[in-house]
Amino acid sequence: MKQMMLFAILLMVLSSSAYANETTTDEMAANDKDASKATVSLYDQGLAATQANDYQKALPLFEQALRNDPDNPDILNMLAHTQRKIGMIDEALANYKKALELRPKFPEAHEYLGEAYVMAALREVEILKSYGGDAKDELDDLTEDIKEAGEKL
């Protein structure tokens, strides 16, 4: 029961937290002078799709924008955001890390990376639960670690 309550609390925190302001199209273009108009348009369409919570539509737009401009941290961040929203957590983690390698002081990417780690931890909780009694000790340990982390906030 405690584990379910912890899971519910973490989900509420994730769903109720205000989203950081994504980098606007103009800001993205200013950050990357080499961005083509086509790439900026793809990024803009992807942003519009994410703002409409249409992540399936946004995904190929950000993927194409990234193919056009593979070292753009704004595109990497929004691609990762989209991946995270549709459950591609491992891919999102990798892309947030790439974005932060390119721009270490990137508040939105740091926020979203943290949210992805919380989702990854919750995924592991669910996996351990699926093992039943065979993973009780591990589930208890992970649950305790998550609680301790929450207390540090």
Image (cartoon, helix red, strand yellow):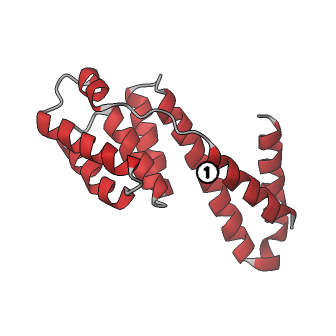
Q: Quadrant of the N terminus?
A: bottom right
At 42% from the left edge and 54% from the top edge, which residue is drawn? Answer: 53
- Find residue 144 and report its horizontal and vertical position in percent: 84, 52
- Find residue 88 and report its horizontal and vertical position in percent: 46, 59
Relative horizontal placement of residue 20, taking residue 61 as reference (left or right): right
Depth check: 131 or 105 in front?
105
Please give the residue where the numbered disc 1 appears in the rendered image.
15
Relative horizontal placement of residue 70, taking residue 7 as reference (left or right): left
- Find residue 4 and report its horizontal and vertical position in percent: 79, 65
Q: How many marks?
A: 1
Task: Specify few, some or many for label 1: CA neighbours under 10 Å numbering under 14, 14-19, or 20 or more.
Answer: few
At 44% from the left edge and 47% from the top edge, which residue is drawn? Answer: 81
Depth check: 97 or 61 in front?
61
- For residue 77, above or below residue 54: above
SS label for mark 1: helix
- Find residue 136 and report its horizontal and vertical position in percent: 83, 70
Q: Quadrant of the C terminus?
A: top right
- For residue 123, above or below residue 135: above
Q: Residue extending furthest left?
A: 37
* Dot 1 amino acid type: Ser
At 48% from the left edge and 53% from the top edge, which residue is drawn? Answer: 84
Relative horizontal placement of residue 151, taking residue 106 as reference (left or right): right
